[in-house]
């Protein structure tokens, strides 16, 4: 028994060391597996894990669209509700005017707006535009003859000199009323060739001017402007044929001698002389 006891103790000691070594190896192996697992889990991107879990094997990963960012530059457009099949009201068109422009000849369509005021008196060589609704053969451009007459189809010879555009319109309407039912007539002055006035002397812009509307001496001088240091504005003359009228610009501006400084309305052929 004594002889066997040392041998037994040696064998028991050897088994204990083997068991301890195996236990340590198992613990090390378990720790290594856990370390590998957590390392892979932490290193794998979350987005890739979600795509890999969501998509089956062999299929493309699902693409998650980015959230829409509201357009802050146009808040009003986002707040307005959509109205499908919305109707837009078309602008109303004056039927007679549209038909008249459609039926009018090419020359009448290209006319310019009236250049004479309501009080302008038509004279020889003036150019007029006459439009009659739904009457293309009448709507045209007419020159006033030297005798002051114009010739219009269905109207014949009619005097235009000495009349305003409104008065001539009434005269043509009365003539057409004999052959047409309620004619719609429009008359305008396109070009003035009959009335002019002239300014000479110490002005920046002299020469001949069209007398298209009511114009006074002061109106004419405002268009021409004086030449500083040269114009004698206290001795201005208005020449009308054989007549002469003096005009003192300085006194008129200051409101002096108004009985002598009359701001006369110009007539065709008047001449304004500004001495230097």
Image (cartoon, rainbow, N blue to C red):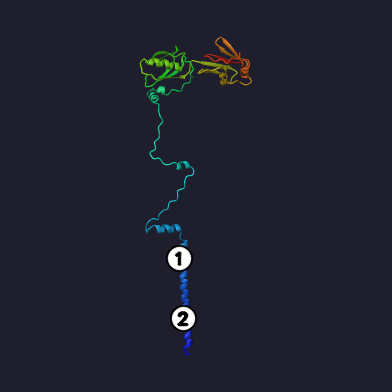
* 32 relative to 250, above or below: below
Is residue 186 toward the left or the right of residue 265 in the image?
Answer: left
Which of the pair 246/110 is nearer the observer? 246
- The local secondary structure at tag 2 comes to helix
Disc 1: which residue? 37
Q: Residue at x 58, y 11 (%)?
A: 244
Query: Residues under labels 1 and 2: Cα distance?
Result: 33 Å
Q: Earlier in the sequence, mark 1 or mark 2?
A: 2
Which of the pair 210/253 is nearer the observer? 253
Q: Residue at x 46, y 66 (%)?
A: 36
Is residue 61 toward the left or the right of residue 257 in the image?
Answer: left
Can you give x and y, in whole percent of width and height, for residue 273 in the image? 58, 15
Can you give x and y, in whole percent of width and height, for residue 89 in the image? 40, 33
Total count of labels: 2
Question: Where on the picture, by quarter, is residue 179?
Answer: top left
- Label 1 CA crowd tier, 10 Å (few <14, some 14–19, many 20+): few
Q: Residue at x 40, y 17 (%)?
A: 173
- The local secondary structure at tag 1 comes to helix
* 6 relative to 98, above or below: below
Residue 94 is labelled as none
- Label 2 CA crowd tier, 10 Å (few <14, some 14–19, many 20+): few
**Which residue is most to the top?**
242
Question: Where on the picture, by quarter, is residue 127?
Answer: top left
Disc 2: which residue? 15
Question: Where on the picture, by quarter, is residue 33?
Answer: bottom left
Which quarter of the figure is the C terminus placed in? top right
Residue 143 in view, yes or no? no
Can you give x and y, in whole percent of width and height, for residue 103 in the image? 37, 23
Residue 30 in view, yes or no? yes
Can you give x and y, in whole percent of width and height, for residue 239 in the image? 57, 12
């Amino acid at each position: 028994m004594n002889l066997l006891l040392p041998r037994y103790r040696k064998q028991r000691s050897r088994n204990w060391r083997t068991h301890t070594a195996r236990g340590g190896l198992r613990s090390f192996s378990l720790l290594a597996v856990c370390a590998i697992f957590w390392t892979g889990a932490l290193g794998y991107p979350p987005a890739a894990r979600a795509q890999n879990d969501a998509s089956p094997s062999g299929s493309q990963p699902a693409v998650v669209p980015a959230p829409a960012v509201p357009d802050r530059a146009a808040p009003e457009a986002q707040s307005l509700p959509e109205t499908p099949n919305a109707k837009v009201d078309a602008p109303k068109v004056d039927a007679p005017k549209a038909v008249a422009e459609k039926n009018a000849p090419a020359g009448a369509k290209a006319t310019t707006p009236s250049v004479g005021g309501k009080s302008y008196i038509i004279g020889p060589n003036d150019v007029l535009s006459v439009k009659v609704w739904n009457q293309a053969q009448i709507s045209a451009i007419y020159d006033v003859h030297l005798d002051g007459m114009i010739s219009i189809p269905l109207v014949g010879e009619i005097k235009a000199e000495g009349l305003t555009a409104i008065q001539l319109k009434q005269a043509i309407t009365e003539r057409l009323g004999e052959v047409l039912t309620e004619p719609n007539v429009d008359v305008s002055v396109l070009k003035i060739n009959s009335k002019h006035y002239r300014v000479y002397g110490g002005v920046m812009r002299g020469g001949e001017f069209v007398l298209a509307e009511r114009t006074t001496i002061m109106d004419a001088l405002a268009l021409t402007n004086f030449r500083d240091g040269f114009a004698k504005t206290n001795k201005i003359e208005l020449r009308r044929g054989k007549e002469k009228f003096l005009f003192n610009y300085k006194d008129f501006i200051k409101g002096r001698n108004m009985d002598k400084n009359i701001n006369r309305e110009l007539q065709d052929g008047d001449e304004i002389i500004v001495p230097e």
